[in-house]
Image: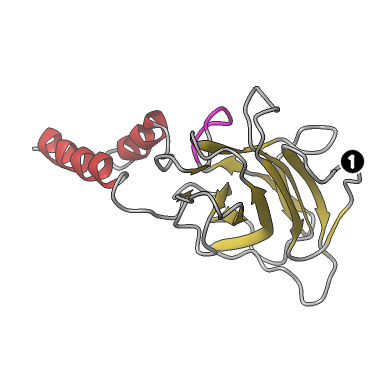
Amino acid sequence: MRLLRLGFVLVLVFSGTSVFAQVDPDPNGIGIYFDQGATVNSAVITEGTDVVTAYLILTNPSLEGNLDFWTCRVSTYLDDPFQGTTISGGPVNGTNIIVSNMPGSFSWSFRVYNYDDPPLEATFATVLSELEILVVDFDRPIFLYVRGGGVDGEVGYSVGPEGASMNPSSGSWDLPVAVINGEAPVVTESQSWGQLKSLYR
């Protein structure tokens, strides 16, 4: 009976990932979405729509309170930076102290200190930045990644004296967290399997 129940859950989970968009269930997720509720991680555009707005969102934060600091880097490439699509953005709250970001870049780094009023509260889906993606290639999918930011390559945030690392919504730093003109990325199978096994411990 236990195997039958597990099989039924597997069918629900793996058939549902391609049909239903949902907020990344893992704590301290970081991803790029095309809505402010962190439910849409793919967009289809055609020529004539050159600029796409997206959102960098922290999901399910484990720390409660107002964000004092966060850091990461977003990019339109994994290995080859010269593929044409550029990305930029600013924090919705606070000051980004990275001065090396240049317009027309294929990646954009954030090291943001939040001391503005009103403060930025860590919520179920906390919008950290509004991103602008300039698309020049409509013939293939454009993959979007979150990577380590700043000089130390960290990806994290802090609330008061406490800090936490953020994890990619795709389940792996080597997998895209969002895509333009392609199939929506889903959480890696190993991570989903681990979540399923935890139900039966």
Q: In this view, does 39 lie to the left or right of 125?
A: left
Q: Is mark 1 on a helix, strand or loop?
A: loop
Q: Which residue lies furthest to the top in this view?
A: 79
Q: Which colour scheme is used?
A: secondary structure
Task: Count all numbered tags in the image, as a single digit.
Answer: 1
| Rendered position, 65 above or below 129 | below
In this view, the residue in front, 68 or 141, is 141
Q: Is residue 65 left or right of residue 187?
A: right
In this view, the residue in front, 156 or 97, is 97
Q: Quadrant of the N terminus?
A: top left
Residue lying at 70% horizontally and 27% vertically, measured from the top left? 82
The percent position of residue 15, horizontal first and vertical second, equals: 23, 42
Q: Residue furthest bottom?
A: 118
The magenta stretch spans residue 19:
no
* Residue designated by label 1: 100
Residue lying at 67% horizontally and 68% vertically, measured from the top left? 121
Magenta-drawn stretch, dominant element (helix, strand or loop) = loop
- Residue 128 position by quadrant: bottom right
In this view, the residue in front, 131 or 59, is 131
The answer to whether any part of residue 62 appears in the image is: no
Residue lying at 39% horizontally and 40% vertically, measured from the top left? 183
Residue lying at 72% horizontally and 68% vertically, measured from the top left? 120
Q: Quadrant of the C terminus?
A: top left
Q: Residue furthest left?
A: 1
The answer to whether any part of residue 151 appears in the image is: yes
The percent position of residue 4, horizontal first and vertical second, equals: 10, 37
Q: What stretch is highlighted in magenta?
A: 170-175
| Amino acid beneath label 1 | Ser
| Rendered position, 36 above or below 96 | below
The percent position of residue 75, horizontal first and vertical second, equals: 67, 38
